[in-house]
Amino acid sequence: MSILIISIPLTSAIIIYMLGRKIGYKGGRLISIISMFINIYISIIMYRDYIGGEEKGVKIKNWYEVGHQTTTIEMYYTKETVIMLLLISIITTIVITYSYWYLSEDAHQNRFITYI
């Protein structure tokens, strides 16, 4: 669940960037807004789970091992991290929605949304 919070917006940005001309601005709008609402939903679930004050580290991968020394890639969640995650997800959704309205006449909407 916690890996999805990063991979969903990244995947949607790559899809919009690679298939922007084929899906058009309406398809790009649909993909970006749906992915951000999924991101908000996951943030709410994580907020509910982590707000009790417990801190968790989610191991993603072992980066390298030298002898007995192991370095891993982890995502570390605390109460403050999850609150910021929820706040940033909501603000990003509002900015993307406003940007589509503001750039309604621009031919390169998908490129701009990919950059956001």
Image (cartoon, grey):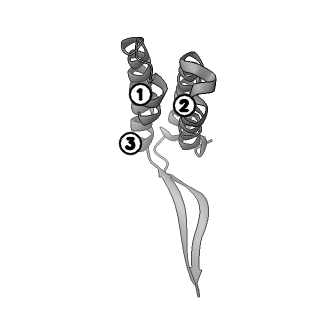
- How far apart in space, not on screen, are marks 2 and 1 (Cα)? 10 Å
| Mark 2–mark 3 distance (CA, rounded to whole Å) | 17 Å
Q: Amino acid at mark 1?
A: Thr
Q: Amino acid at mark 3?
A: Glu
**Residue located 39% across and 30% down the image:** 87
Instruction: Give the image location of residue 85, x and y in percent.
Output: 44, 37
Q: Secondary structure at mark 1?
A: helix
Q: Nearer the viewer, mark 3 or mark 1?
A: 1
In the figure, 51 relative to 35: above or below?
below
Q: Of the residues tagged 2 and 3, which is closer to the observer?
A: 2
Compared across the picture, whether 46 is left or right of 112 comes to right
- Pointer 2 with pointer 1, Cβ within 8 A: yes
- Could you tell which of marks 2 and 3 lies nearer the N-terminus? 2
Q: Which residue is mark 3?
A: 80
* Nearer-N-terminus badge (2/1): 2
Q: Are marks 3 and 1 in contact (CB under 8 Å)?
A: no
Q: Which residue is disc 1 drawn over?
A: 92
Within the image, what quadrant is residue 80 found in? top left
Question: Helix, strand or loop at disc 3?
Answer: helix
The Cα–Cα distance between marks 3 and 1, rounded to whole angstroms, is 18 Å
Residue beneath the point at 59% across and 59% down: 59
Labelled disc at residue 39: 2
Q: Residue 86, percent across and down?
A: 45, 31
- Element marked by disc 2: helix
Q: Amino acid at mark 2?
A: Asn
Q: Nearer the viewer, residue 29 or 24?
A: 24
Residue 30 position within the rendered picture, expressed as x and y whole percent measured from the top left: 58, 19
